[in-house]
Structure formats: structure tokens, C-alpha cells
Image (tube, rainbow, N blue to C red):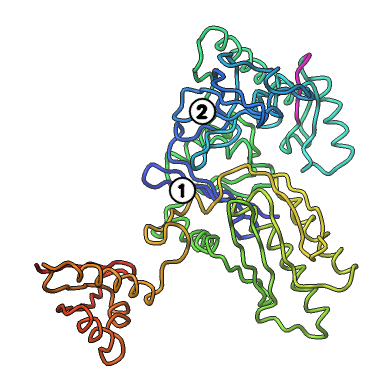
Amino acid sequence: MLRKVVISSFLNQVLVGIVENGRLAEFFREKDQTSRIVGNIYKGRIENVLPGMAAAFVDLGLERNGFLYVDDLIRDDQRPINELVKKGQEIVVQVAKEPEGSKGARVAARISLPGRFLVLMPQDDHVGVSRQIPNPKERARLRELAGQLKPAGMGLIVRTAAYGRSDQELRKERDQLFKLWRKIDRQSRKCSAPALLYRDHDLIYRIMRDVVTDTTEAIIVDQPWIYDRIIDIRAKLHISPATKIELYSGEVALFDQLGLSRDLEKATHKRVWLNSGGYLIIDQTEALVSIDVNTGKYTGRKNLAETVLRTNLEAAREIAKQLRLRNIGGIIIIDFIDMHSAHDRQLVLEALTAALAADKTKSHVLGFTQLGLVEMTRKKAKTRLSHILETDCHHCGGTGSILSQDMIAINTAQRIYTLAREPDVKSITVSCHPLVAAALAGDNQENIKLMRKQTRKQITICGCDQFELDYTEISCQR
């Protein structure tokens, strides 16, 4: 798989696109380092304990309190949360998820400090190896080495970039992470809550640490300062010299030149076309995400069963890509085209599972329900792409629709009749969108003639092209 990392900067914001096989696979945006709090470590104070929700609120010194679930407190401890923490207690936590809407940040008391090759977990005494390392011999070697390297009572997870790395390289990074933890721990003992103990690196550093691997073909940037920073980071993180670093100087904006702006725009659409002519409809709600698969323009070559299977197989692979690009997490329901063959259904499930394997974010495919729908979950690891790129429409309030011209006309007519009942009102003038004006006036002005007759008032309807459909002005002369 050919992978490129594209980094651009506009208006004090950094944009990062991960391009795989010429197509945008992931997108990141960061305004400034202080605006992001995921990965930061705080010394907080328990503000409230909610046994009924198995959670507690933690004062971090931010605008809203953090939310701490009992499962993120202590591994394998089944006691209720009110026996584990008390109101007023000081506690060291790490932000696991950004605040969203009215919800505060989700925090965890089990800290993790990521390096390029390893992740140190001071409160978890276990060893893990990235599932992105498929080679059994290499997995066994790294697991054994991590068991030897992990500090007593702590845990280590071996990251994908550790593949093929020497004992000395991993030991050196282990020492750096352990030194960082001791510094954070000392700081936590000195200060009072709430306090920031550690701020995670900025987006550029995290991309170089977490995303760039030996298989990354090139890193393309459009600003000299980003280029210089990446050269410096590459030396610190021992990134392969085979990965090219290019400074783009073309006249067209970098994201436009590579077609990434177009890919981002498509990622906000509900309809996603497949190469075969079929398409997906992706509906995102607060509770879950539903994905509908349709044959569209694809009619197949042999028979209906083959057409359905081919469309569903292509859709399964595309769904995995869309989930990753759009940062979709939570419960996901997929309505594949009906298949009567159990063998075909199994093939589609296997295709979906295989496509999801390339995604670092953990997902779980539960299979087909009795209604023929596929249930799956994907961890909510990042903010949805739609929340990064879009904001609620000030006309529809985020519903995606507004009242029709007929309903707006009816509501306006009701207001006209209400005003007309006031004895000192002599005439009423309505300014509105031309479509609403036409509905108000009616065919051959019949509606307006009737209103004038019934109210015994002078009524004037004016169509204004510059008005939005749902905007209406009513004035009266007294």
C-alpha cells in the first residue's frame, strides 16, 4: 500500500491528510496546541460521585468537568465507584476524549504515555503487541522483549513501528518514557488540584510519531517552517531516510492540487457512489449510524444473485474506508442488499472484517440480525469529520430541512388574520420569498381577495428575491 502524508497550514491551522493508494484515508485538523486536550494529564479533584451511573465528575480546571467511568479507574476492580473514589479526593487523570456538545471530556485514571515504538502504562501491569503486526515470529519476539523491558508493576504495549527494531532502540525509548513518567509523578506530588501536569505534543509531532512508518512513501508539506520541523522530528524519532520529505511550491493550494479538498467535500455527502454504479446512503444520528446499500446503476452481467453479491462486497470495502475517513464511531447498522445464500452473507462479513483490519481504531462486527441487518461497533476515538468540517445550518437548526412554502404561507396567513383583528390596523404589508408570496396570493389572486374580503383590510403581498424561503416580514399601518 502506497501511503503519503500531506501537511498544509492556513489561518494558523494545520491540516493533515493521510493518502493511501492515491485516496484520502484520514483527515486531521488542529487550530493550535492549546485547543486540543486529548492526551493531556491533569491532577483533578472529584467533584461528584454518581453510583447510579458508575461514574464521577472531575474538576480539571477547564470550562467543564471531566467524566470518569469506573472502568477507566482501576483494572479488574469490581467494586462500585463510590468505594473507589470520594468527593474532594485528588486524582491524576488523562483526557481520553475531547468535550463534545454539552458533555465534558472523558478522562481515565489509567495513564498511557506513547512513544514511537512503545506505550508505557504506569498503572497497568501487562504486556501487549499491536494487532497491526501480523508476523507470528516477530510478535513473539516483541512480546518477550516487552516482558523483559517493562518496569516492575507497569505495562508496555509494543506499537506497529517497533516491527524489526532492535533491543537497544526499544530499551532507549523505554528509559525515556519512564523518565517522563517520573517527572509527571513528582509534579503531581508538588501541586494542588486542579493542575495541568503534562501537555501532549502538537499535531505535526503526533503524526510523525503515530502515523508515519517505514512504509510511508513521502511527506509533502507546503510551508518552510513545517518542512524544517519535520526534518528535526525525523532525526529524533529515527524515521527511515527512505521516507521522502518534499516542500511543495506550486501555485495551486496543496490540498487542491492533490484532489484532497474534493475528497473532503464528498465525505460530507450522505450518498457515496461505488465504482460499479451502486451507492451507499450514510445517515448519522446521535444514537447510531445507519448505512444503506443500493445497486443503483449497476445491473450486473449474469444473474441477480451475482449482481447483489458483487455490489455488497464492494460496499463492504467502501464502508470500512468511509468509517475511517469520517471518524464514525459507536453503533453502526448496515443494510446490505438482501442475500438468500448463507454462503454469500458469510463472504460479505469476511470482506467487511478484512477491510476493517487496516483501521487502527478497534471495531467489532457482530453479524447479521434476524432482520437481515449487520450490526457492528467502532470505538469513538476521534471527533467525527462532520463535526470538524461543518456547523449546524442557521436556517434549519441542523435538522436538514425547513418548512415548505405552503406551511410558511399558512403560518403567515394566520398572523395576518391576527393583526387584522386589531381595530386600529388599516393595512398590512407582507414581504417574503416569491414562492411563499405565490402561495399566499393563490391562483388568480383568489387567496388575497378572500383575505381582504374577510378582514376588510388592505393587504399587500410583496415577493423579494433576496429573502430566504423561511424569512418573512410583516408590517402594518395604523
Residue 441 on the magenta segment: no
Q: Describe residue 288's horizontal placement relative to residue 464 as left or right.
A: right
- Residue 147: image x %, image y %? 83, 22
Q: Residue furthest bottom?
A: 444
Q: Please, what secondary structure does the residue beneath circle 2 have?
A: loop
Q: Classify residue 463 by image quadrant.
A: bottom left
Residue named by callout 1? 8
| Magenta residues, start to end | 152-157
Q: Which residue is mark 2?
A: 65
**Residues packed near mark 1 inside 10 Å, few (<14), some (14 to 19) or many (20 plus):** some
Q: Is residue 97 above or below residue 123?
A: below
60 w.r.t. 277: above or below: above
Q: Amino acid at mark 2?
A: Asn
Q: Looking at the image, tell me whether mark 1 or mark 2 is earlier in sequence order.
A: 1
Q: Which three-letter amino acid code belongs to the residue tagged 1?
A: Ser
Rendered image quadrant of residue 13? top left
